[in-house]
Amino acid sequence: MEQNFYLSLLLLFVSFITLSLFFLFYKHRSSFTGPNLPPGKIGYPMIGESFEFFSTGWKGHPEKFIFDRMSKYSSQVFKTSLLGQPAAVFCGAACNKFLFSNENKLVTAWWPDSVNKVFPSSLQTSSKEEAKKMRKMLPNFLKPEALQRYIGIMDTIAQRHFASGWENREEVLVFPLSKKYTFWLACRLFLSLEDPNHIARFDDPFKLLASGIISMPIDLPGTPFNRAIKASNFIRKELLLVIKQRKIDLAEGKASPTQDILSHMLLTCDESGTYMNELDIADKILGLLIGGHDTASASCTFIVKYLAELPHIYDGVYKEQMEIAKSKAPGELLNWDDIQKMKYSWNVACEVLRLAPPLQGAFREAINEFVFDGFSIPKGWKLYWSANSTHRNAQYFPEPEKFDPSRFDGSGPAPYTFVPFGGGPRMCPGKEYARLEILVFMHNLVKRFKWEKVLPDEKIIVDPMPIPAKDLPIRLFPHKA
């Protein structure tokens, strides 16, 4: 009798598991039913092809996921399943143009669940809504007049950074130093924070946050996603302390209403006369700090990498930057005119951005069903555009693996082929800010040092941005005065 009871329980359990799996597979497949969908593979329920998508990046070749499927299914658009969502991957310049030109018409921005959970809005709105508000607020701080005022500050911070972290050292790790430089700038320009010890408190939490934002949203101890949530909570608490102190300083006249983005947020109300609450401001500043330093630090790191590998490119940058340095009076800081003279250096930086784009691509969501390239894209499907589908494509960049800054001479690459900052209405609003901090970094670096890589064959990992596996150790050779 007892044996029959346990046997019945076992059969019941097996039946439950079988039905659950059947339901998962049925639901997964039903998400991909419809007439004339793009060709492609959908993978397993919940997982889809997410593991393949991420693993090619972990192995240092994120373009492999894209190009393998472009050759097998379609050079324009193929279907897949990413981060638990049915998705279509758009490839090539025509696809970029279509997505960027139809923002808020056929498509809208979409972030994975991991982003919404790592950045929970205090107002219970979506990341998409908060990003819209942020984009309206940023132009005052990123317009040309404002950016011109930042150059001297950037140069001052760069000089301090190289004096404290690079000079009088035989070897350094480039990636963490680049992150310190760009984060120091973001803290100074967005929050007026300058104390290196205070800024250093954010170092480790931001590393954890960056590695877990775009990850499988598995909230278990030890997972990148779980660590990212804990890190964002820590940073938010630290920012709240800064915000509370700024309110006191503003009230006592110790801070200026126009000194930075934080003061602006505290003193600006919406159409109904409501001011942002402190937690809402902390959320927005957190997003700004991520956007304001993470991508630029990766770019600075890869500039160092390529200049070490290509002495003739280094020589061109050095010549240009030393002409500018020699034109300056002792103690005179860089200015807007100096930046405009850095044409070759910026071409080099652009070629680095082509070969190692910090932004590998981005997601959109179909607002309504539409047809592209003869294929139907259902409403609600997620759409992914890939920078590598054009950046490393011989159709747009002949000999795509070759480092050639002359691609950016004259009018530069064809429209919608070079997209490290995205495009259309959602093009990165900090593009010009990034250009300035990268060029100021290059100027201060090459006028001080030549260098060589300690690990010639160091592996590159993309997670979600490209980073050197060992932080790019280099051996420094200071220029003789």
Image (cartoon, grey):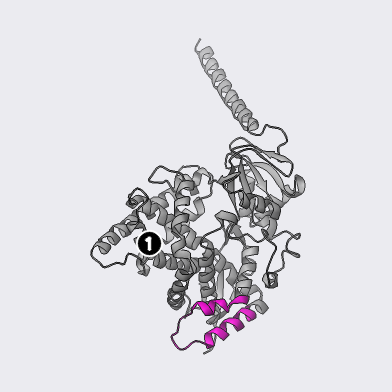
For the residue pair 249 and 86, the one nearer the viewer reads as: 249
Query: In the image, what residue occupies the spot 32% across and 50% down?
Result: 273
Q: Quadrant of residue 241?
A: bottom left
- Is residue 228 visible in the rendered image? The answer is yes
For the residue pair 404 and 451, the one nearer the viewer reads as: 404
Query: In the image, what residue occupies the spot 65% across and 68% down?
Result: 351
Question: From what the image shows, is residue 92 above or below residue 160?
Answer: above
Q: Is residue 190 magenta?
A: no
Query: In the image, what residue occupies the spot 63% across and 78% down?
Result: 314
Q: Can you name the residue that lies furthest to the left here?
A: 252
Query: In the image, what residue occupies the spot 73% across and 61% down?
Result: 396
Is residue 396 toward the left or the right of residue 134 in the image?
right
For the residue pair 454 and 71, the one nearer the viewer reads as: 71
Amino acid carrying label 1: it is Arg
Percent position of residue 105, x then y: 59, 45
- Magenta segment boundaries in residue numbering: 314-343
Q: Can you name the residue that lies furthest to the top here?
A: 1
Q: Is residue 338 magenta?
A: yes
Percent position of residue 232, x then y: 41, 52
Q: Main secondary structure of the magenta part?
A: helix
Percent position of residue 277, x then y: 33, 50
Question: From what the image shows, is residue 248 above or below residue 158?
Answer: above
For the residue pair 359 and 203, the one nearer the viewer reads as: 359
Percent position of residue 97, x then y: 66, 53
Is residue 180 toward the left or the right of residue 415 in the image?
left
